[in-house]
Image (cartoon, grey):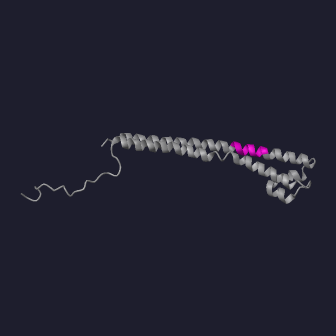
Amino acid sequence: MSRFDRPVPTAHVRRVTAPFPTSAAANRNVWIAFLVVCFMLTGLVGLFASYGPSIPLQRALHRIQAVDEATSSGVPDEPALRLVLGKSADDILTGPGDLPARLARARVAIIADAEDDAAGVAARTRLMIFVVTALSAGLGTGIMLLASRQKPD
């Protein structure tokens, strides 16, 4: 009898187990959890994107407050107005009509700019959420299709 024909003693051999379950059901649960994470990513993007639409309104309110402070003494403070309004400060400083009428026109212009900015932010936010949702769904579906093709162990 050669040494290769003898039975190998197995009493001292420790059985090695896989670190993760390898059954088909456990594997399927991992992929379902991954798919849930793909859709949770969409929710997180939506959550973070919800902060964007308020920015134009906040900016407009700050600009209106700065204009009110710059003109509170009854005489427009030219450097402060130019800092806040830029080129449109000329409408308040030298525009037609008295100071209250010029301030009213400036407020209307600031609100109109904020509405335009808000419409742009809203459109970009919807586009971003749509794209991330589609990508997350595509990624999750693709991985689920690959996982369903695996042969059970």
Looking at the image, the residue that sits furthest to the right is: 98
Residue 72 in the image: x percent, y percent?
Answer: 88, 53
- In the image shown, does 51 or 141 lie closer to the viewer? 51
Q: Is residue 148 visible?
A: yes
Residue at the limit of the structure toward the left, as seen here = 1
Q: Residue furthest front?
A: 11
- Residue at 66% across, 47% down: 52
Left/right of residue 98 with respect to residue 120 in the rendered view: right
Residue 40 versus residue 150: which sits nearer the camera? 40
**Residue 9: horizontal and vertical position, in percent?**
16, 56
From the viewer's perspective, tell me whether residue 111 is left or right of residue 19: right
Q: Quadrant of residue 141?
A: top left
Mark count: 0
On screen, residue 151 versus residue 5, left or right, reads: right
Q: Is residue 118 magenta?
A: yes
Q: Split into 4 quadrants, where in the image is the C terminus?
A: top left
Judged left or right of residue 37, residue 58 is right
Please name the residue shown 10% across and 59% down the image: 3
105 in the magenta segment: no
Rendered-image quadrant of the N terminus: bottom left
Percent x, y of residue 148: 38, 39
Q: Report the span colored magenta.
A: 111-119
Residue 51 appears at what percent x and percent y?
65, 47
The reply to whether residue 135 is in sight is: no
- Please determine whether, in this image, residue 87 is positioned above or below residue 29: below
Name the residue at 49% across, 44% down. Answer: 38
Q: Main secondary structure of the magenta part?
A: helix
Residue sitting at x 51%, y 42%? 39
